[in-house]
Amino acid sequence: MKILIGLLLALSGALVLPAPASAQDELPPLVQVQPPSYDGARKYGRTLKADPGAWSPVPERIGYQWLRDGVPIPGEVRRKHEIAPEDVGHRLDLVVVVGATGYADTVVQLRVGKAKHRVGVRRTVRYSVRTRGGTGGVDVADFRRLAQETYDDPRGWRARGVRFRQVRHGGAFTLWLSQAALVPSFSGSCSATWSCRVGRNVIINVDRWRDASPAWNGAGRSLRDYRHMVVNHETGHWLGRGHTSCPRRGALAPVMMQQSKGTQGCRFNPWPTPRELGR
């Protein structure tokens, strides 16, 4: 805790030489007049704002550290914290450290609570995962896990209140990992080059899953983001969404745009835009 106190005070901008531990122990603590608190909804995309409370004497320095599941969040040492995707489903806490000349540094930890999705569950969709043909060295267990991570991410279709649950068999749709040459076997409208959606079949082309696309790679985007994008795009078709185009140069590309082929001047983007999410 003493290490955390020193770190917080340093990050708060107060250049204070720490007193020896024995000297700190002998100093009186500040008296809490009003406990620290926070304001704001614990939802993805919202901002929490800390109130350090009231103390006697008035603190000369105040430090903050936001925690996720009890672990300090790197860089989150300011009064405000915007709830990030990785916060959702995890407990947030706030540590406040106050100090004044002649008084011991005083630490208070405030329990904030579990961060939630932007909206509650409005619809639960069950789906199963299958393969067709060779998987080209792709680990199917990883495919299952990464697809579910995409569905659970608060930036994705979950932000419309759609919760996806993977089941062993059946479900409302089947998510396929298909050998490239066999993608057209689902429909003559599908190409061996790209992923596809046909009826209740959401088909991910194993070549695209493994290697992304030339346009995506040429933009320097990550393979993981491509995988988010292609799952969101093809599932978006199953949800009833059609293809869209770039709204204007420099804007985020809609996830329902065919970004594997290019973005027409938009910025590559793996997630549904606010407009696609109805916000």
Image (tube, helix red, strand yellow):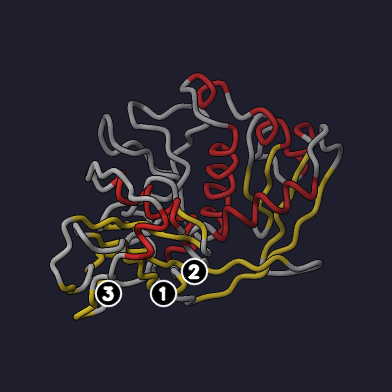
Q: Of helix, strand and loop, which one carries label 2? A: strand
Residue that carries the numbered disc 2 in the rendered image: 91
92 and 252: which is toward the camera = 92
Q: List the residue tagged with mark 1.
A: 111
Q: Is residue 47 placed above or below 185 in the rendered structure?
A: below
* Amino acid type at image mark 2: Arg
Question: Residue at position x 42%, y 50% from top?
Answer: 272
- In primary-sequence order, the first of circles 1 and 3 is 3
Q: Is residue 137 rendered to the left or right of residue 114? A: right
Q: Residues within 10 Å of mark 2 (few under 14, many from 20)?
A: some
Q: Which residue has dot 3 on it?
A: 37
In this image, 118 relative to 86: left or right? Answer: left
Check disc 1 and report its element: helix, strand or loop: strand
Per the image, label 3 sits on a secondary structure element best described as: strand
Discs 2, 1 touching: Cβ within 8 Å: yes
Of mark 2 and mark 1, the one earlier in the sequence is 2
Residue at 66 percent across and 70 percent down: it is 126
Give the image location of residue 45, x and y in percent: 34, 59
Q: Amino acid at mark 1?
A: Arg
